[in-house]
Every structure is written in structure tokens, then in C-alpha cells.
Image (spheres, rainbow, N blue to C red):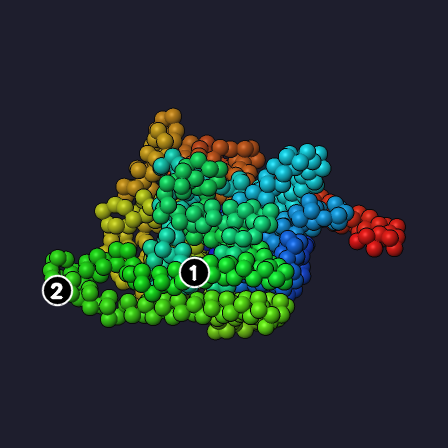
Amino acid sequence: MGHDVVQWRAGAESLIEHQEEYGEVAHWATNMFSGMPATTISHPPQISNLDNALLKFLEFIFPAAEMWILLGGAYLMFLLLGARPLSAVFGAIIIGFSTYIPIIIGAGHNAKFLAYIYIPWLYNGYFLLTRSKLNPWLATFLFAWALTLHLRAYHPQVTYFFLFPLLTLFFYDLTKAVKSGELKPFAIKTGWLIGAAVIATLISIQLYWSTLEYSAYSMRGGSELSGSSGLARDYAFAWSQGWGELLTLIIPGAYGGSEFYWGPKSFTSGPHYFGALTLLFLVIGIWKSSHKLKWVFLGPGLATLLFSLGENFGSLNNLMFAYFPLFDKFRVPEMWLMISVFCFSVPAVFGLEWILDRIMNGKPKEWKKSLYAAGGVGLIFILIGFQFLSFEKPGERQQLAEQIASQNEVPVDDPRVSQSVNRYLQDDVIPGRRELARGDTLRFGFFLVAGLGILFAMGVKKLSLSAGSMLFCILLAYDFIRVDQRYLSENSLVDQNLERADVIQRGERDIDRYLKERVSTGEGWSYRVLPMIDNPFNNASPAYFYPSAGGYSGAKLGYYQDLIDEAFFSGPYGINKGVLNMLNIRYVAAQGQFNIPGFEAVHQGQNGVVMENQDVLPKAWFVERVVSAENQSEVLNNISEDFDAASMAYAVLPESKEYEPAERTVSVDEYNANQISLQINSEADGFLVLGEIWYPEGWNITLNGEPVEMVRTNYVLRGFEIPAGDHTLEMVMEPVWYTAGNWLAGIGTLLLFSMLVIGGVQYKREETLKTPEDDDRL
């Protein structure tokens, strides 16, 4: 029951309610960030396949079935790379039990995990198509099926990151085909790969079509204020891996794990540990293996290792961020290490294979030299773990000094402050960090010595190759599992009958019950709440109970993020009443009462107080004046000053307009995830503002059945020029990607499984025509 899946369930509440009430897919979420496209929270149902049929049925043992898919795929991948069965098991353990995997499972990053489990199967399909005699229909089916399931898991960052090693392999094969004069056969195989990619894209097109449509408006599409086309650099490079922190790949507690973390990031859930024995064979593989694909995997592994450094290796990553396609769309650089570990597992297995071959062929000088070299490298890391770690977080000493000085009302440079900081660090902080680091350094040394000992015993014929290889697998698995349990233990398990909604409901407070009962207007729509006591813009839990102006999303609308950054908390009172009024925010849940005109305390709970905004505006209202601005930045600047949202609005228009006083009324006929319908009566022309977030894609808007322009108003809202008379203003959310995508997904699925049928028929025919001589040759 990871954090992110619970947050997802809270944010999806309005979509689920709509589905249950209307029997249709919701396209607009009404309960987070004052309204946003539903596809950013929960994608529409997909056509049946392995992921939503078999795995859905087996979700009561999650993540066991998914782990077997990952381990089985990795095992087959190493077999196809020419490894012995036990060496393939060794490699599969690296890929499947690297500590980052249980960390993301425990955090609830399910999409990331599900996207990852199909990566080895992509390689399997590719290898079977390009390097085996399996009929191309079946090989292409496997590649297309794996790519379909990977894309449907929908984690574009995992897809983008793994394109680096996958395309490296493709271009290596292309170069080899050109040099050997076999470009035509390779072009044919490339055609099969392209066909598979087209089919997989068709099946998952709804997901990526909607993402492409939305990306221009999301945080990842840049900011109108800065003029960027991607994420802000500082935001994107948050959670950059430190240079020294790379040591955690082999000594997991070197930088404090998660509890005692002292690296350059704000905090961390844990390291990307890939095993002490992995390093032993990686060193041998890099130095000795002559496998042609060694550098094809090692190259991307090293590149992604450098990408993970983010701002700590700016000379490379600033260049990539500025110029490389889509590099600026993703954040958390340390995630690149997921690809590094995957790629390093391959030369590590090649190293194991190389030394097994040398032992089997009786070449003691060669394998002994490799042991000395690997042991020497290991000793260097042991020395670093014991002698060269400071155990102080960057800037930690200064931060502590400022806190102590502030608490005691003395200058920061007071000698007593420095003494207190030193005493606190040396007595209370550093010992725990040092103990974990040195304990894991000894642990690394133990596994390194054990690995070298097993190899030596195999080399002098005291241990068979199979027994030694099995011991390596057991030791590697034990090593990983013991570290993994720090981040995903049995204590993490919950009753399989416990629903995510149950977890959220158990956290319901008296303040939530009060708000839930009072946000409804009785007119088919509800007021919104600004939950200040709940880290409002990074917590979706309140949105489960009532419509929230906040929420939880790494890809919220970019202009809503601008509103949060620039306008929500501006003005003389530290909170912008004009913005709260226009967003229909009637209640603010706060730690304590505050004295701002127009707010009144209406409920005192155990967890905080509810302040009522007496000046909140209805869902739709007419303004007296619309002030013209040259651009949206000017609009945002204008509303950043506390303004009278009831009487004036700002928009990018040719000229400002004032409207004569007249009798005007608006009532809400329908308000749900897919439709908003207003009944309007106006004795004179006017300008109507709707307290709903502006988003032009997918909304079909009509006034009395005729298309009408939606004006972006007050930076984030919808505005409409309304002529005098009686009118029905109707907005219906009908995204093209949803209806067209359904048809295309159906066509793609038919093509996918047609390939399986054709391939099966061909395989059966080939088996029927096969002679005993063919079996002998095989």
C-alpha cells in the first residue's frame, strides 16, 4: 500500500464517482487543483491484454507475478546472450533484486515498476528476431507484445531512459550490417521491428495521444513566464546523485541509507545497490571479456551513470538539458541509475562467463590475474568506506548553526554556537552514519572475499563449476534480499482485502467531516477548499473528501503552477483573496485562526481550524469590466495584486471593455466531469467568468447550439462574451483521442494476435516438414 497509489486513489475519487453515477469514463477531474484533465490522474480502460486480465486477476499477490515476469524475462535474455543457465540466473537476480526495485514498489511507483518488468522481454524479442532462426512472425509478436505491455504500463520516463541502451544496440547492429555488406537482411528485420512498434503504438495510442495533447499545457511543457519549453532546470535536477554517493552502488549504507542520509539530495528513499559480487564480475567482464556486445551495454551504462549526477556534472547535463530532445521533460536524475544497473548486469555476467571458461579450460594464470585485479579494486572501495567519508551533509553545519543561533538569540559566529554544532554532530548524528557505512563496508568486504574464495576453490578443482555458480547465485540473492528488507520488509504488507480507499478513510478527521458536509451548494456543484494544514499542493488526500484547490501531481497544469508560485499567497495579507474568490474557495483549513478581512472561523477541530471566506464567488458570475493585457504574464502580474474578482477580470484582448449595469442571472443546470451547462439571462451584453480552469483541448462549447469562443480569463479561468437575452451555455468534454483511440487500439490488438496465429501456423508447418536430418543438424 505505497504512498503514491494511495495518493492516486484520493485524486481519482471524482472520476470513480462519475463512472459509478453516469456509467461513462470521466474526462475532467473536479476535485484536484481546481479542475484538471482526468488523463493526468487515471487513464481510460484499455482493451484486454495480459496486464489488465491475468495480472489484474493476480493482483492479490502483487508484486509476485510481476516479479516472475521480470526474472523470467531477464533469465531468457542472458540465455540468448549466450550465458550458461546458472550465469543467467545470476544476471536475473541483479536485474530483479537491485534495491531500487523494492524501493519503488514500497513507494507505490507501480507504473514505473510495471514498465520495467517488460524491458528484458523487449530485448528477447529483438534478439530472437535479429539473431535466431525463429520464424519472424513469432519473434515480432514477442517484441510487439512486450512493447505493448511496456507502453500500456505508461511511464514515459522509463521508456525514454531505456531508449538509450536499446537504440545503442540497434545502431551497433546497423553499423555491423553496413560493414559486413548485409544491409538488406538487416533492413528486412528493421521493417519487422517497425511493424511491431506501429502495432504497439496503435494499441496504446490513447495514452500517448492524450499525453501529447496535454504536454503543451503541463508543467513539463514549460512555463509562459520563463519562456521555456520544458521543466525548470532547478526542478528537473532536484535529486541529482552526488559523485561520492555513487559509492552506494556497492556499499549501500555509505551515505546513510534513508534514515541517516547525508548526501547532497534533500532526502532519499534508499540507494541503487547492485551487489558486491556484481562488482567482482563487472571488473573482470570489463577487463577480460571479449563478448562483442560488452561495450553496447557498458557504454549506455556509463552514460546514464553520468546523467544521474544531474547538476553535479553540469558540463554534460546542462548541455543535454538544453539541446537533447525531450531531456528537459523529466526530473529526478538519480533515476538514470535504474538503467545503469540494468546495463552493468550484462558485462558482469560476461565476466562470470569468462572466468568460468578459463577455469574449465585450465588456464590458472589468466583467472588468477583477474582475481588479483578484482580484489585490488575491492580493497580501494573498502579503504574509501573506512577512511574517506566525512559523514556531514553539504551545508548541514551552517544550517544547524543558524537554527541554534536563532533559538538562543545570539549571532551565528558566536563561538558557543560552533561548539554546540560540533557537539551535536559528533555525539548525536555522525555515529549512526559512521556505524552504518562501516558496517556495510565490512559487509562488502565479506562478500568480496567469499566470492574470491569460491572462485579460487573452483580454480583448484575443490568445487565444481555448477556448485560454485549456484553458490554465487545464493550469495547474491542473500546479499540483495538483506539490503532490500531495509526498504520493503514484511512490515510493509497489508491485508489483501484492504482497499486503498479504506486507508484514506481511516485517516478521515473531524475537520474533513465538517468540510465534506458543507461544501455542497445544493445547486449541483460544490465549493472548493484550500487545505493549508495538509501541504496543500503536494497531497491528494483531502481531494478524496471534497474538491480541493491543491492535490498531488508531478504533471499538473503549468499555468496553475504559475498561479501557485506567483499569485496564491501574494498581496498585503499573505493570501490573495481575489484568487480564492474566483476559484470558488469558500473554506481554508488552517493550523490556527488568522485575522484577514472577510474570513471567519466556523469550526475548531482537533487538527486545525476552518476559516470561511465570506466573499467567495459562485460558479459563474458577470463582471463589470474586462481589462486588456498584452500577454498572459501581464495578466498574472495583475491578479497577483489582491483584486476585486467580482467586478473585474483580466484577459489578453485587443482593448479593455466596460459593461453597462443590467439585470443578469446565471444558474448551473449540469456540472460533472464531462459536461457543464449554464442557463443565462442577461438584459444587456456582458462578460461571464466561469470558476473552472481554462483548458481548450477536448471541450466542445456552444451558446444556444452555436460554437462560441472561450476566452482565457484571469490567467487560469474561462470567460465568455454573452449577448443580451436568454441563453444556454454548454460545455461538453469529448476528446478526439478517446473515441478514435478506441478504434485504433482494437485494430492494433487484432493485428498483434493475428501475428501470433500466423506465426503459430508457420511454426507447426515447419515442424511437420522437418526431417530427422534437420534435428541432427540442430
**Place of residue 510 in the rendered image (x, y in percent of width and height, measured from the top left):** 38, 68
Q: Secondary structure at mark 1?
A: helix
Q: Position of residue 192 (x, y in %)?
A: 70, 41
Query: Can you give x and y, in whole percent of width and height, for residue 422 in the image?
Result: 20, 65
Q: Along the line of sight, which residue is nearer the eye, 713 or 290?
A: 290
Tell whether 303 sits left or right of 136: left
Q: Quadrant of residue 69?
A: bottom right
Residue 416, label in figure: 2
Q: Is residue 554 above or below residue 195?
A: below
Image point (81%, 52%), residue name = 777
Which callout, 1 or 2, points at the residue further toward the start of the chain?
1
Question: From mark 1 to mark 2, how far is it between C-alphas?
Answer: 45 Å
| 1 or 2: mark nearer the eye | 1
Position above or below: 675 against 447? above
Residue type pointed to by label 1: Gly
Mark 2 crowdedness (10 Å alpha carbons): few <14, some 14-19, many ≥20: some
Residue under label 1: 376
Would residue 28 be visible to someone looking at this image? no
Identified by mark 2, the residue type is: Arg
Residue in the foreground of this view, choosing between 434 and 122: 434
Of the pair 193 and 504, the residue shown nearer to us: 193
Q: Which mark is residue 347?
A: none
Residue 431 in view of the camera: yes
Question: Is 721 drawn above or below residue 41 in the view shown?
Answer: above
- Residue visible at 59% across and 39% down in the picture: 171
Q: Residue at x 63, y 50 (%)?
A: 122
